[in-house]
Amino acid sequence: MTTAKPRNPMLVLLFYSALMVTLPVVTFFVSQYTMETYLNTTNSRSYIYATASSVIVIHIILGIFVYYAYKEDKVVPFPPEKED
């Protein structure tokens, strides 16, 4: 088993939590503005598309977090002692 540089789980959790709060909100407003301005959609239709894009971003963030947590190297606190 390889020993990897240990990562602070609290910092990883805070990073992904910050992504979960900020990215969907930004995505919602940017996609809503884009739909209304450039694609000339109605307000209700732009809300639907903006909500769908926010949900997609949330699923992508969760997928990346689960992948990161699954693929994280198992850190061995004490290397096993060699028997001679």
Image (cartoon, rainbow, N blue to C red):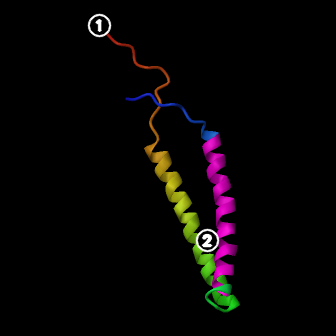
Residue 15, magenta (yes or no)? yes
Q: Which residue: 56% across, 36% down? A: 7
The kind of residue on which mark 1 rests is: Asp
Task: Determine which residue is flagged by label 2.
Answer: 54
Image point (60%, 39%), residue name? 9
Rendered residue at 58%/71% (across/down): 55
Reading the image, the residue beneath label 1 is 84
Q: Furthest-top residue in view?
A: 84
Q: Residues within 10 Å of mark 2 (few under 14, many from 20)?
A: many
Q: Amino acid at mark 2?
A: Ser
* Secondary structure of the residue carrying numbered label 1: loop
Rendered view: 47 above or below 66:
below
Q: Residue furthest front?
A: 38
In three-dimensional space, the C-alpha distance between marks 1 and 2, rounded to whole angstroms, equals: 58 Å
**The magenta segment:** 11-36
Residue 70 vs 29, above or below: the answer is above
